[in-house]
Structure formats: structure tokens, C-alpha cells
Amino acid sequence: MTALQQQARALGDPTRHGVFRYLADADRPVGVAELTAHFRLNHNAIRQHLAKLVAAGLAVEATARPSGPGRPRLVYAVAPAAEGHWGTVGPYERLSRMLVEVIRTGLAPDEVGRRAAGEIGGAAPSGDAIADIATAMARQGFDPDVRRAPGGTEIVLRRCPFESAARADPATVCALHLGLAEGLATGTDVVVDELVAHEPHRAGCRLRLRAGGHAPEPGPGGPEPGPGGPQKLSLRGRARR
């Protein structure tokens, strides 16, 4: 059975399809208790539906940050690979909405990205802000890899979900990415210093972050020549006030 057939079979059950749609429409990962209240089913029934969605690659499971005694609760969200399919919003629809917002409001792309972060974040905090940012970026299809770096941490974005658009206008699309990261860091002790963007088809863009302190003043920097390769675009993060 192909992955597509497995997903179609999983969504063939009306209740399971309803659970999937609920996850798709939510702006944050959802817990079992919320689903049982909404669908008026017992916990075991909801867990069985969620297990089939996870097995089919339609949903992902994560552990929420402990909020008291007992085991941390599990939360669920639509799998990044399933976004844009089965009636869900895909990356290019999200990009189009952000670009419309840039045109409608006249705001800079990084500011629109910061405002949009609330829609893609919402993950239950794990206590590790950088890990939470990476998780949110993973849900958008960036395939992030967290690495230690001198003076802080880098999140290497191994895939660009907006590759064709970024090739046409890297300054705008990359500024949206930078704003998304800064918005996800809002309310934490993490500062996004810089986004070093590579050619979209190569990916490997690097978000440079650190805990505490103040970020450099904003504004796109000049291109950084790569060793024997194409130029890179460096976008500075916005300083905290």
C-alpha cells in the first residue's frame, strides 16, 4: 500500500477525518482532552484515531511541557509533509497570505513575518526555547537542524519550502523567514541575531541565535561571498528594545 493509499484509508473514517480537520484548523498542537470534549468520545477512542493518523503520516505527536505532577501530556498537530494536502493549507498558500499582507499594509516583510509567527507557533513550550523554534520551523517544512556555534546556536534550514519564490525575490522571502524566527522567539530569552541565506535550491540557510542579550540593529547586510561558491544574503535581526 502506498503512503497516499494509507492516508486515504485513514481519512475514510468520518470521525477520524473530523479529528484531522480539527488539527488542521487549530493554530497550535492539540491535546487528547480537548479532542474528547469536542467529539464527545472517550479518551481511548480518540487515542486510537490519533494513532492511525500518526501511523499514516498525517499527524505528529509531541510531549508538552510538564505543568504539574504526573506524566507530561501528549499533543498532536498535522504532519508537515501532509500540509497542502487533504484540504489543509500548504506553504505556498501561507506565503501568498503573507505577501498579500505586505502589499495591503505596506509593512516590511520581516514585520509581517513576525506577526505571522503566532499562526505557525503555538507549540506547547518544552522549556527549551530554541528547540521550540526549531519544532515550529519543522512544521513549516524547513527541515531544521540545531547545531552549537561559537557564541550561540545555529538552526540550519536544510530545505526551503518557498524555493521558487525565494529564487525570484530572495530579499523579500528571506526577510519573511527572519521575521518568522523573530516572532517565534518573542517572549523567550532567545535573540535571533542573523539569517544567512543561501541559494534556495541548495538550502542550508543558517539562523544564528543566542540566549539573552541584545541583537544587532536590523537591516540587510551586504552579500557574504561563499568560499568558491555563490554569494550569500545576510539579514540582521532586530534589536530588542
Image (cartoon, rainbow, N blue to C red):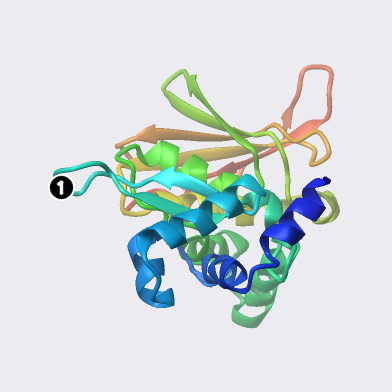
Residue 193 visible, this orientation: yes
**Which image quarter: residue 138?**
top right
Q: State left or right for residue 211 relative to residue 140.
A: left
Location of mark 1 (residue): 68
Instruction: Write the residue at 85% across / 55% down.
Output: 168
The mark tally for this picture is 1
Q: State left or right for residue 171 relative to residue 241.
A: right
Q: State left or right for residue 67 relative to residue 105.
A: left
Instruction: Give the structural element (helix, strand or loop) at label 1.
Output: loop
**Is 30 above or below relative to 136?**
below
In depth, the one of 171 and 119 nearer the eye is 119
The location of residue 173, given as percent across then percent down, is: 70, 55
Q: Quadrant of the N terminus?
A: top right
Instruction: Write the residue at 48% across / 46% down.
Output: 61
The location of residue 181, given as percent across then percent down, is: 51, 49
The location of residue 169, given as percent across then percent down, is: 80, 55
Residue 29 visible, this orientation: no
Amino acid type at mark 1: Gly
Label 1 Cα crowd, 10 Å radius (few <14 / some 14-19 / many 20+): few
**Is 66 above or below relative to 156?**
below
Q: Quadrant of the C terminus?
A: bottom left
The location of residue 174, given as percent across then percent down, is: 67, 50
In depth, the one of 69 and 103 nearer the eye is 69
Q: Residue furthest bottom?
A: 104
Instruction: Write the residue at 59% across / 40% down.
Output: 195
